[in-house]
């Protein structure tokens, strides 16, 4: 039976994430303690006790999710509760870094530096130019593209996340997203503005992508030992050079999550395990393929399910 591990991205963060693993398992404690030392502050305290507004900030949320997800993975590894064989991995946006680390494309410490830099750069880009994101519920990909196209007279706007059938997120200027909300309503599509720092996976992040390129060039990266799906192409990464290139492109390109999951299904994946805070990917998988078997491990209680 072919299995895949899924790693969540930004939006899955919440105060208390990882705390039960830290308290119950030495493997998780080691990951959080290593991160605290490397970062020079207590990320663990922020993840476990907040304050929530600080944890929600892009630069903190991304690091917190990466560390929490790896801590859960290491716990399963120490307990020998991982699937007998992991055939593929995928991660949503930030989660792609977690998946690449699990596949041994780079070390935990190097992944932590990358995620910390990525979060800071994306936060800075968001603050530099006002922008936002808009979720469309009930729009297929073509309709979402049409809504974005019809709103570009008000500013820059693109499709940023193809999450699941009927669930697409737009990303762009505040004015363009406001226009898109009106256009969506006219087309009978529900639109919801997201509470985010800025227009992620859009041209608004070009400065962050440019700076990440030099950081990735200085990072030791090798081909993953297990295939990892790229958010940009919805196909597996091949080598270190393509990983560096696609992680840069990912910052300004749409996340093709629905297409990525379709690729896993086409490759014969039958069982999916979401490792990390929240249940976002578990919910999306049920929308993508109701017949798929999805296990969520976000709490210690989930280890016994």
Image (cartoon, grey):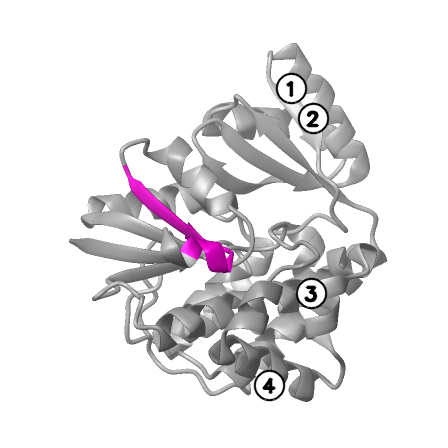
Asked if one can make out residue 136 in the rendered structure from this viewpoint, the answer is yes
Q: Does the CB distance between marks 3 and 4 fall below 8 Å?
A: no
**Tag 1, which secondary structure?**
helix
Q: Can you give x and y, in whole percent of width and height, for residue 276 in the image?
A: 50, 59
- Packing grade of label 1 (10 A; few <14, some 14-19, many >=20) is many
The quarter holding residue 147 reads: top right
Asked if residue 296 lies in the magenta stretch, the reply is yes
What stretch of residues is rendered in magenta? 292-302
Q: Can you give x and y, in whole percent of width and height, for residue 14 in the image?
A: 67, 54
Q: Residue at x 75, y 33 (%)?
A: 176
Q: Between marks 2 and 1, how big is the CA–CA gap?
A: 6 Å
Q: Between marks 1 and 3, how big is the CA–CA gap?
A: 36 Å
Q: Residue at x 64, y 69 (%)?
A: 63
- What residue is disc 1 on? 184
The quarter holding residue 113 reads: bottom right
- What residue is disc 2 on? 180
Q: Residue at x 30, y 56 (%)?
A: 4
> Disc 1 or 3, which lies upstream in sequence?
3
Q: Does the CB distance between marks 3 and 2 fall below 8 Å?
A: no
Which of discs 2 and 4 lies nearer the camera? The answer is 4
The numbered dot on residue 34 is 4
Q: Does the CB distance between marks 2 and 1 fall below 8 Å?
A: yes
The numbered dot on residue 47 is 3
Q: Between marks 3 and 2, how big is the CA–CA gap?
A: 35 Å
> Disc 2 or 4, which lies upstream in sequence?
4
**Tag 4, which secondary structure?**
helix
In screen coordinates, is 152 left or right of 94?
A: right
- Packing grade of label 3 (10 A; few <14, some 14-19, many >=20) is many
Q: Between marks 2 and 4, how big is the CA–CA gap?
A: 44 Å
> Disc 3 or 2, which lies upstream in sequence?
3
Which of discs 1 and 3 lies nearer the camera? The answer is 3
Asked if residue 158 lies in the magenta stretch, the reply is no
């Amino acid at each position: 039976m072919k299995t895949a591990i899924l790693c969540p991205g930004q939006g899955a963060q919440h105060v208390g994430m990882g705390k039960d693993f830290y308290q119950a398992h030495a493997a998780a404690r080691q990951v959080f303690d290593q991160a605290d030392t490397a970062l020079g502050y207590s990320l663990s305290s922020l993840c476990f006790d907040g304050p929530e507004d600080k944890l929600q900030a892009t630069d903190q949320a991304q690091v917190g999710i990466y560390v929490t997800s790896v801590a859960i993975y290491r716990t399963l590894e120490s307990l020998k509760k991982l699937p007998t064989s992991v055939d593929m991995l995928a991660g949503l946006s930030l989660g792609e870094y977690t998946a690449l680390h699990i596949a041994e494309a780079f070390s935990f410490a190097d992944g932590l530096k990358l995620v910390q830099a990525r979060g800071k750069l994306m936060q800075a880009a968001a603050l530099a130019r006002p922008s936002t994101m808009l979720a469309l519920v009930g729009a297929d990909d073509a309709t979402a593209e049409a809504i974005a196209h019809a709103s570009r007279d008000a500013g820059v706007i693109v499709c940023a996340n193809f999450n699941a059938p009927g669930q697409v997120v737009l990303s762009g200027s505040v004015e363009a997203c406001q226009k898109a909300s009106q256009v969506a309503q006219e087309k009978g599509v529900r639109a919801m503005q997201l509470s985010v720092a800025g227009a992620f996976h859009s041209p608004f992040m070009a400065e962050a992508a440019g700076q990440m390129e030099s950081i990735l060039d200085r990072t030791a990266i090798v081909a993953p030992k297990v295939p990892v799906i790229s958010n940009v192409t919805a196909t597996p990464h091949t080598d270190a050079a393509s990983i560096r290139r696609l992680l840069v492109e990912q910052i300004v390109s749409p996340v093709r999550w629905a297409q990525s999951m379709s690729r896993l299904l086409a490759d014969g994946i039958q069982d999916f395990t979401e490792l990390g805070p929240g249940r976002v990917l578990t919910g999306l998988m049920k929308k993508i393929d109701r017949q798929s078997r999805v296990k969520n491990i976000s709490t210690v209680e989930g280890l016994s399910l």
